Amino acid sequence: MAQRHLRSAWHIIGALGGIGAVAELTGSLRTSVHNWRAAKRFPASVYKVMTDALAARGVTAPAALWGQREGKRDIAA
């Protein structure tokens, strides 16, 4: 299965089933999820649960949408 890479909060929320599903997944209020979509980013506290759910669906997203930095890969072996 090919992985999809989503780059927006709007598409990520859609991929996870919408506002209600993301609210339930993260234990957050629906209004909070609406605010995340409007802000075009998510709080760091929901990074793990959301990215795990995305991975289960074959989807990836930039860690920066949760205020995370992606580490540099060690290419020297």
Image: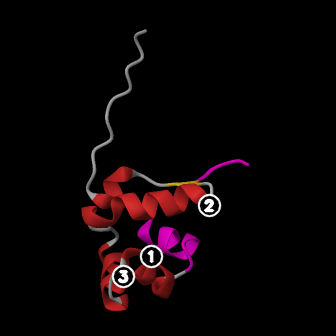
Q: Is residue 29 visible?
A: yes
Cα distance, mark 2 to mark 1?
14 Å
- The quarter of the rendered structure image containing the C terminus is top left
Distance from label 2 to label 3 (Cα)? 20 Å
- Please give the residue where the numbered disc 2 appears in the rendered image: 57
**Residue 5 forms part of the magenta stretch:** yes
Which x, y percent locates residue 9?
A: 42, 69
The first of marks 1 and 3 along the sequence is 1
- Most foreground residue, 53 or 6: 53
Q: Position of residue 42 (x, y in %)?
A: 32, 68
Disc number lying in front (1 or 3): 1
Regarding residue 7, the answer to whether it shows in the image is: no
Does residue 4 appear left or right of residue 2 in this picture? Answer: left
> Which amino acid, by three-letter code, is at mark 3?
Val
Q: Earlier in the sequence, mark 2 or mark 1?
A: 1
**Numbered disc total:** 3
Query: Quick one: label 2 or label 3, which is nearer the N terminus?
Result: 3
Tell me the crowding category of disc 3: few under 14, some 14 to 19, or many 20 or more residues within 10 angstroms, Cα based: many
Q: Badge 2, how many Cα within 10 Å: few under 14, some, many 20+?
A: some
Q: Secondary structure at mark 3?
A: helix
Q: Residue at x 73, y 49 (%)?
A: 1
Tag 3 residue: 33
**SS assignment at label 2:** loop
- Residue 75 percent across, percent down from the top left: 42, 17
Q: Which residues are magenta?
A: 1-17
Q: Amino acid at mark 2?
A: Arg
Secondary structure of residue under mark 1: helix
Dot in front, 2 or 3: 2
Q: Amino acid at mark 1?
A: Leu
